[in-house]
Every structure is written in C-alpha cells, then in structure tokens.
Image (cartoon, rainbow, N blue to C red):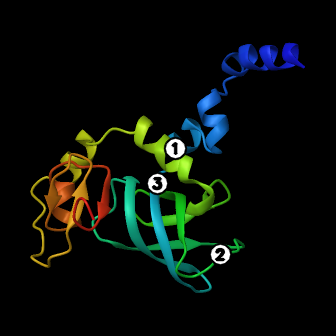
Amino acid sequence: MKAVAIVAFILLPIIGISQQSRDVGIDSALVRNSDLVALVKIQDVTNDKIYLKLKMLFKGACVSENELVLSHNDFNENFSHNTEYLLFAKADNNCHLYFDNESRLIEKAQGEQDVDFLLTILPCSDVKVKERFKGTPCHRNLGPVCGCDGIVYGNVCEARNAGIQIFKIGRCNQ
C-alpha cells in the first residue's frame, strides 16, 4: 500500500496533476480556460438565460456590475436558489457571458477548498482589467466591494478601474 502511495505521489506531478489541484476538485487548466470565475447566487433561469447575483469575483475582465446574465443552450444543472456556487464560464468577444459544456457550477459548500485554491493561484490585480476599464466613467450608486488589496471601493466599476481582479461584494471585514 505504501508503494502505491509513493508511486502516485511521484507520478502525479509528471502527468500534470498537482496534489493541490487534485485535492480541491478544480485545477489551474479549468481556471485558465474560463473567462469568468466567480462565486454567484442563481436568481433565475429561463429558456436561454441564467440570472446571477455576484458574491465574489476571481477572474473576469468583462464584469462591471454585481448582476450577471449568462446565455446557455441546455442548462441541465441541478441547483438551489439562494445557494452560492462557484461558476466557471466563458465570454465571447463582445463580453457576452455564456455557459457551455466546458463550464462548471460547483456548490460553494462542497468547494471551500476551491475558493482557497483560487486565491492562491490568481493575482489580486490585472493589467488587462485596468486597461479595459481605464477611463470608464462609473455611476455614483453606492455598492461597496472589498478588493483583494484590502481597500473598499464604492462599487464594482471603481474596483475595475483600479485594476482589481479579485473582490467580494460588501465592505471589508464584514
């Protein structure tokens, strides 16, 4: 039994699966290939749209508000309203978000380690985000977000203008 464990420990990095990503259920390839990585709450699902409330953003240069709409072809996921999920989705060239067969939806209660994993592999700020939102006028509606840098921004737009990639909805230390 010990020999099998030792062989697995040695071979996992060689075949491209790190022990950390194997333990958490997601891996860096899923994160890298997703255009949107976020903690969301599903509000509603229609024939072709999924309406979401953003709770925390990890990756997604197209996101400028705390409510998201994703297009989908056949959304066959089982989900519960008012439950938080980690979402891995795609975006087209016009920043329309969509859910496809490579996208994933993981209940947060089953993926606490996934959140920790995302925080260790993704940068707090991103030059691409800053460039995309540079000079974008922000509305004055107060909707505070806590940036990964520990600063409270007035709303999602202000955090994005600062180049902040990872933030949670609400004030810091809540």
Q: Secondary structure at mark 2?
A: loop
Q: CA distance from mark 2 to mark 3?
A: 18 Å
Q: Secondary structure at mark 3?
A: strand
Q: Which mark is residue 31?
A: 1
Give the amino acid at mark 3.
Val
Q: How crowded is the residue under tag 2: few (<14 C-alpha within 10 Å), some, or many (20+)?
A: some
Whole-percent x and y of residue 69? 45, 75
Q: Which quadrant holds residue 53?
A: bottom left
Residue plotted at (70% across, 74% down): 78
Residue plotted at (15% across, 50% down): 162
Q: Secondary structure at mark 1?
A: helix
* Residue 94 appears anywhere in the view: no
| Residue position for label 2 | 79
Give the amino acid at mark 1.
Val
Q: Which quadrant holds residue 46?
A: bottom right
Q: Which quadrant holds residue 2?
A: top right
Question: Mark 1 and mark 3 in contact (Cβ < 8 Å)?
Answer: yes
Whole-percent x and y of residue 47? 62, 85
* Sequence-wise first label, 1 or 2: 1
Question: Mark 2 and mark 1 in contact (Cβ < 8 Å)?
Answer: no
